[in-house]
């Protein structure tokens, strides 16, 4: 009799116990959001910050160009609102937001808008609190 079904069950149970899913939000105490961009991730992926003026600083640690965009979360792609973005970063380069960014409490989407990077997993969540 094969041990394969038992192995699959054990692996599945371990994955559930490990908590597969969205990583916990990293709390940023200041007003500057520092992230690393590479293929195809934003690190940290999920961030919590206080409302108000937020500065974006992104370092491209990958081999491709990337950017960081803060946008609304919506199921209708025609209604996405962009709140701020960085210039395009080339490998090894650090970039900042193009214009001052002031956010109210809520949930926002972090994404790289170059090519299909977002579809390949280069996105995250920004939770803004009071």
Image (tube, grey):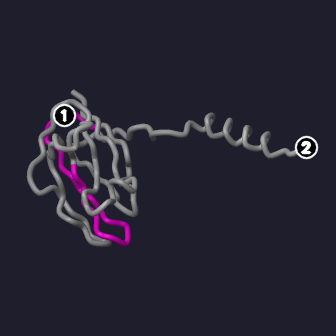
Up-down: is 49 above or below 95?
above
Q: Position of residue 102 (x, y in %)?
A: 12, 40
Q: Position of residue 109 (x, y in %)?
A: 27, 43
Is 4 situated above or below 61?
above
Q: Earlier in the sequence, mark 1 or mark 2?
A: 2
Q: Nearer the viewer, residue 119 or 35?
A: 119
What is the magenta range?
Answer: 49-69
Q: What residue sits 23% from the left and 31% below the top?
A: 106
The answer to whether 41 appears left or right of 130 in the picture is right
Question: What is the number of the mark on residue 51?
Answer: 1
Question: Which residue corresponds to the image point at 24% horizontal and 67% vertical from the top-left?
Answer: 89
Q: Residue furthest top?
A: 130
Residue drawn where x is 29% and y is 40% of the image:
126
The answer to which image quadrant residue 19 occupies is top right
* Residue 17 appears left or right of 70: right
Residue 26 point in image, percent of width and height: 38, 41
- Quadrant location of the C terminus in the rendered image: top left
In front of the other: 23 or 35: 23
Residue named by callout 2: 1
Q: In the displayed image of the protein, which residue is found farthest to the left?
A: 99
Residue 64 covered by magenta stretch: yes
In this view, 74 is above or below 130: below
């Amino acid at each position: 009799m094969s041990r394969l079904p038992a192995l699959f069950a054990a692996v599945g149970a371990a994955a559930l116990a490990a908590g597969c899913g969205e990583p916990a939000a990293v709390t940023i105490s200041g007003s500057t959001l520092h992230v690393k961009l590479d293929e195809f991730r934003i690190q940290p992926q999920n961030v919590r910050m206080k409302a108000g003026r937020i500065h974006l600083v992104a370092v491209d640690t990958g081999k491709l160009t990337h950017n960081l965009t803060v946008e609304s979360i919506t199921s209708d792609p025609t209604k996405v609102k962009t709140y701020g973005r960085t210039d395009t970063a080339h490998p090894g380069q650090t970039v900042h937001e193009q214009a001052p960014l002031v956010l109210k409490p809520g949930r926002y989407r972090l994404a790289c808008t170059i090519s299909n990077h977002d579809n390949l997993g280069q996105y995250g969540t920004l939770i803004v609190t009071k």
